Image (cartoon, grey):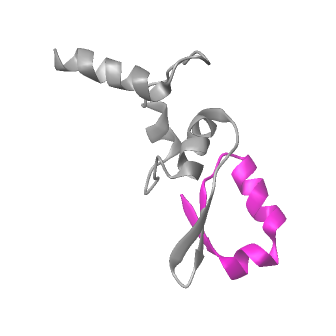
Amino acid sequence: MSTVSVREFSYNPSAIFARVEQGETIEVTRHGNVIALLLPGSGTLGRYSALVARGVLRLKSTTTNDLDRLPHYSVPADVSPVELLLAEREEDDR
């Protein structure tokens, strides 16, 4: 994961977005604090971008390779993903 300042981002946003399109995750900082996280919209990391955007999942030093090791679940539209995970966790406890 790379970090760029707001100033660097403002100089050439197209170049930053091009890096994200290539699969790179970029933190945008202001005064050393992360204010935005730019995530690829497709591929392995794209599966988790909605969770990151909602704050459910936080990426610190996670790389795309780390995300490849996470399980992938196919969830029907009429099933709650949370309920599915809780049911699986309950089965693991038995």
Query: Measured from the top left, where is residue 82 in percent x and y?
Result: 43, 29
Query: Measured from the top left, where is residue 89 in percent x and y?
Result: 28, 23
Total marks placed? 0
Q: 54 or 19, which lies in front?
A: 54
23 to the left or right of 18? left
Against 64, residue 79 (above or below) is above
Query: Measured from the top left, where is residue 70 in percent x and y?
Result: 43, 31
Q: 41 or 82, which lies in front?
A: 82
57 to the left or right of 43? left
Q: Is residue 12 magenta?
A: yes
Q: Residue at x 79, y 63 (%)?
A: 15
Q: Residue at x 74, y 48 (%)?
A: 21
Which residue extends farthest bottom?
31
Against 74, residue 68 (above or below) is below
Which quarter of the picture shows residue 2?
A: bottom right
Which residue extends farthest left?
94
Q: What quarter of the picture does the C terminus occupy?
A: top left
Give the magenta range.
1-26
Which quarter of the picture shows residue 93?
A: top left
Q: Is residue 40 magenta?
A: no
58 to the left or right of 9? left
Against 80, residue 20 (above or below) is below
Q: Residue at x 53, y 42 (%)?
A: 64
Q: Residue at x 33, y 18 (%)?
A: 87
